Image (cartoon, rainbow, N blue to C red):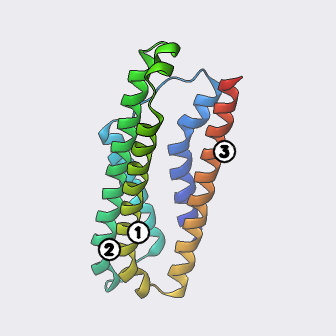
């Protein structure tokens, strides 16, 4: 168990180190390449699989879970690329042009579509996990819960960092 936690912490520090560096220097846009995204997804999948220590009988359910994780990662990558493109277009406009050209109704529709896509991806992931989760031992379920709590805390911390950074940028 200690080995799994150490591997998870190492993965977190490796993937979060650019965030810590970005806070100590002026923010510069860094874009992950497709290879970077794939490597990060592979790392996440390996971490989950290592933490669960699946039995040979359970491995038959793993491909569906892995495919759903990869599909969700691809969707996230596409959403981030779309957001970067939108921000890039807005950066070419003056603040007055941006105000004149904004369309809040269109924004709400785009946001609703993005949330619907995220919900569909999350449902597919839950559907893929269901058969495997039913076969997990109590110990495996505890490890999965611990990993889930760890990930949720990291997401919450990153969201808080972004919120604070946005507040600092607004000052």
The residue at the far right in this view is: 171
Query: Secondary structure under badge 2?
Result: helix
Q: Residue 170 carries which label?
A: none
The residue identified by callout 2 is 62
Disc 3 versus disc 1: nearer the observer? 3
Which is more N-terminal, label 1 or label 2? Answer: 1
Q: How many other residues sit within 10 Å of disc 1, few (<14), some (14-19) or many (≥20)?
A: some
Q: What element carries label 3?
A: helix
The quarter in which the N terminus is drawn is bottom right
**Percent x, y of residue 7:** 52, 58
Q: Which element type, helix, strand or loop, lies under badge 1?
A: helix
Q: Is residue 89 above or below residue 109?
A: above
Q: Residue placed at 43% from the left, 15% from the top?
A: 93
| Upstream in sequence: badge 3 or badge 1 | 1
Q: Mark 3 points at which residue?
A: 160
Q: Is residue 91 visible?
A: yes
Decide which of 7, 115 is in the foreground and name it: 115
The part of the image, by quadrant, that contains residue 151 is bottom right
Of the 4 image quadrants, the one containing the C terminus is top right
Foreground disc of the pair 2, 3:
3
Residue depicted at 60% across the width and 61% down the height? 150
Marking on residue 49: 1
């Amino acid at each position: 168990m200690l080995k799994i936690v150490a591997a998870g912490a190492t993965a977190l520090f490796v993937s979060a180190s650019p965030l810590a560096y970005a806070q100590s220097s002026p923010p510069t846009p860094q874009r992950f390449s497709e290879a970077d995204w794939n490597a990060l997804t592979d790392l996440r999948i390996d971490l989950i699989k290592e933490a669960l220590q699946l039995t040979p009988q359970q491995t038959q359910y793993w491909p569906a879970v892995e495919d759903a994780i990869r599909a969700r990662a691809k969707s996230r990558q596409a959403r981030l690329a779309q957001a970067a493109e939108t921000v890039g277009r807005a950066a070419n406009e003056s603040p007055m042009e941006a105000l004149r050209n904004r369309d809040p109704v269109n924004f709400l529709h785009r946001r609703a579509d993005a949330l619907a896509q995220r919900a569909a991806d999350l449902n597919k992931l839950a559907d893929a996990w269901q058969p495997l989760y039913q076969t997990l031992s109590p110990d495996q379920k505890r490890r999965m819960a611990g990993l889930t709590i760890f990930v949720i805390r990291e997401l919450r911390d990153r969201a808080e960092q972004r919120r604070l950074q946005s507040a600092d940028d607004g000052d």
